[in-house]
Image: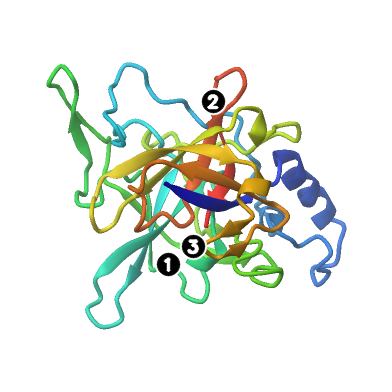
């Protein structure tokens, strides 16, 4: 059993507020530049999508900690090239939150930035991902994995300043917008509304590639833990703005930093991302 501290995600309305404020503030003013201010930067502001966070397809079967090709399509694989061998190792994850932005943790983009960003990924070992359905039909992604470039990385300004890995959150702005219509393997995750309370349900799902032990995306169930019972984590004291989850599964190790922790809405109509895993 392990306890996993994660950094809380601000509500979607906060992102929209930042966009309005940024248009009226001097670019050098840092007052409105905390986490997520990157969504307001530049002339091509990318609003949060209305269609997001599709729930797992009930017509397919997932066994244990395995995921299916058609589920969790907001996942992003972040790869880093070994300085000597140049081999790409996928050591971090992220999530698509809009056509221009990937959400991850700060320690996945600083001091080392990712060399490879893959969208529409499921199996790291194949160019075009395929799986066999329960009726023995071959189901494949419509096109190869999409490798994209980024033009900006914004790290929370108080990252690592309040404590070890405090405010561990960052945004990656992609060089080109994602065309969701071209590839159904890529879908954004929803961000929470202001009234969403992670403690109301307490059960969440985290997905990641357990690189290098497994090349296929895996999942684990998380149960929220009261901060009073999780005051100490392997990295130190739990700080304000962080919550704690417990998992019975130690299946997510390599590549799980930056992984989205998602929960269904109260109506179970879609998934929302409430946190990112340190």
Which residue is at 67% across, 50% downward? 45
- Cα–Cα gap, marks 2 and 3: 28 Å
Q: Is residue 70 above or below residue 247?
A: above
Q: Quadrant of residue 75?
A: top left
Residue visible at 25% across and 51% down?
A: 124
Left or right: residue 36 versus residue 55 is right
Residue matched to label 1? 114
Instruction: Please give the residue where the numbered disc 2 appears in the rendered image.
Output: 270
What separation in Å lies between label 1 and label 2 (alpha carbons)? 29 Å
Which of disc 1 and disc 3 is earlier in sequence? 1
Q: Residues within 10 Å of mark 1 (few under 14, many from 20)?
A: many
Residue 118 as seen in the image, left or right of residue 21? left
The residue lying at 35 percent from left, 69 percent from top is 80
Q: Taking 269 as reference, is 108 above or below it?
A: below
On the image, the x and y values in percent for residue 40 come to 71, 54
Q: How packed is label 2: few (under 14 Cα within 10 Å), some, or many (20 or more)?
A: some
Q: Nearer the viewer, residue 122 or 168?
A: 168
Left or right of residue 91: residue 87: left
């Amino acid at each position: 059993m392990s306890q996993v501290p994660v950094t809380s995600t601000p509500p979607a309305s906060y992102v929209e507020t930042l966009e309005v404020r940024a248009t009226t503030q001097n670019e050098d003013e840092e007052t409105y530049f905390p986490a997520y201010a990157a969504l307001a930067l530049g002339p091509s502001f990318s609003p949060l999508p209305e269609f997001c966070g599709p729930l797992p397809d009930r017509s397919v079967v997932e066994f244990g900690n395995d995921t299916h090709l058609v589920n969790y399509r907001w996942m992003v694989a972040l790869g880093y090239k070994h300085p000597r061998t140049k081999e790409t190792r996928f050591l971090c994850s992220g999530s698509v939150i809009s056509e221009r932005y990937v959400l991850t943790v700060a320690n996945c983009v600083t001091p080392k930035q990712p060399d490879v960003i893959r969208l529409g990924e499921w199996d790291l070992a194949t160019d075009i991902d395929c799986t066999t359905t329960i009726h023995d039909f071959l189901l494949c992604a419509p096109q190869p994995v999409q490798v994209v470039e980024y033009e900006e990385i914004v790290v929370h300004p108080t990252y690592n300043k309040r404590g070890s890995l405090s405010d561990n959150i960052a945004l990656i702005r992609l060089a080109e917008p994602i065309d969701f219509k071209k590839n159904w393997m890529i879908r954004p995750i929803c961000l929470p509304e202001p009234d969403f309370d992670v403690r109301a349900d307490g059960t969440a799902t985290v997905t990641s590639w357990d690189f290098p032990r497994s090349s296929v995306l895996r999942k684990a169930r998380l149960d929220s833990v009261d901060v009073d019972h999780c005051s100490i984590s392997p990295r130190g004291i739990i700080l304000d703005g962080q919550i704690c989850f417990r998992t019975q599964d130690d299946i997510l190790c390599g590549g799980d930093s930056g992984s989205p922790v998602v929960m269904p809405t109260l109506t179970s109509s879609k998934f929302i991302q409430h946190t990112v895993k340190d």
